[in-house]
Amino acid sequence: MIFSVSVMPLNSPTAQPKPMILDNLPSPPISSNVMPRRAKVQIDLILLAIEALELGGSEVMLAMVQDLQLQEIIKNRVVLWRLRSTNPLRKAHSRRNLTLDEAKALVVVACYIARRLTVVLRQFLLEYQQLNEKQLPVENNFRLSEYLERFRAHFRSRMNPRRTTVSDYRSDEKLNALAMSLLSQLLFCTGTSGMQRFWISLFDGEVE
């Protein structure tokens, strides 16, 4: 009896299936498979807020990548940095495009981390509101003040001060306001269909 055996070359490339979790986010009808400028900025800032909330933020993100089986897109720390460097406001800005699938992966990671931080997000937003109502400085709340201080440090060390958008945030007060607005967005992501609604909001004004 003769058997026919088909042998695949060892180095033959195989197409990797797209992670199914990305199907939770619709692909908008945009003219190309790349993300708009504003969306790249917003995604990176959301991740910057997570870094300020979580010590070892990059490790937390990479662990979530593993949990969500997104390592075919975000393979390691260097790839994560390169994807975030597509934010044109960064000092180390990369001119490479951010594809829809790469952006979806970053948004999914951010939203799943946000769900785990829901209690903290609610507490910080409530405490910030109470301090404002009593006209007290944020320094009166140690944990909240620590978050804001880390966010300001991250923003100033990584964003290009020569960019007009970045120069608008020279004062601590404006950076604090930005940091808190990002917490509101992260909390928004934790709600019913929050991840999908946040994703769609990234394309406001980009699709008809």
Image (cartoon, helix red, strand yellow):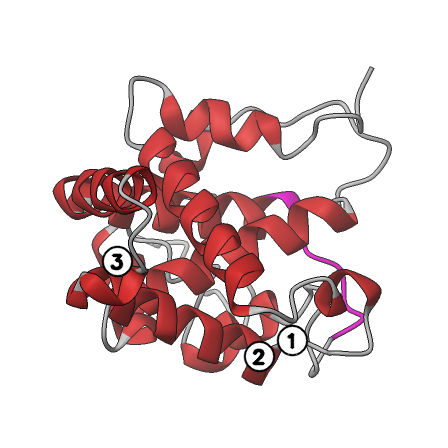
Q: Which residue was labeled with disc 2?
A: 156
Q: Tell me if residue 24 is in the magenta stretch.
A: no
> What is the span of residues highlighted in magenta in the rendered image?
94-100
Q: Tell me if residue 99 is in the magenta stretch.
A: yes
N-terminal of the pair, mark 1 or mark 3, is: 3
Verify CB contact (< 8 Å) between mark 2 and mark 1: yes
Q: Quadrant of residue 48?
A: bottom left
**Which residue shows up at 37% across the image and 46% down it?**
183
| Residue 204 drawn above or below residue 129 | above
Distance in Å between CA atoms under marks 1 and 3: 25 Å
Q: Nearer the viewer, residue 1 or 111?
A: 111
* Residue 200 spot, x, y in % from top left: 58, 25
Q: Which residue was labeled with disc 3?
A: 64
Left or right of 53 on screen, residue 107: right
Left or right of 31 on screen, residue 61: left
Q: Nearer the viewer, mark 3 or mark 2?
A: 2
Distance in Å between CA atoms under marks 2 and 1: 6 Å
| Residue 27 drawn above or below residue 40 | above
Q: Secondary structure at mark 2?
A: helix
Distance in Å between CA atoms under marks 3 and 2: 26 Å
* Residue 58 spot, x, y in % from top left: 34, 73
Q: Nearer the viewer, residue 89 or 156?
A: 156
Q: Secondary structure at mark 3?
A: helix
Left or right of 21 on screen, residue 32: right
Q: Which residue was labeled with disc 1?
A: 159
For residue 138, the mark is: none
N-terminal of the pair, mark 3 or mark 2, is: 3
Q: Residues within 10 Å of mark 1 (few under 14, many from 20)?
A: some
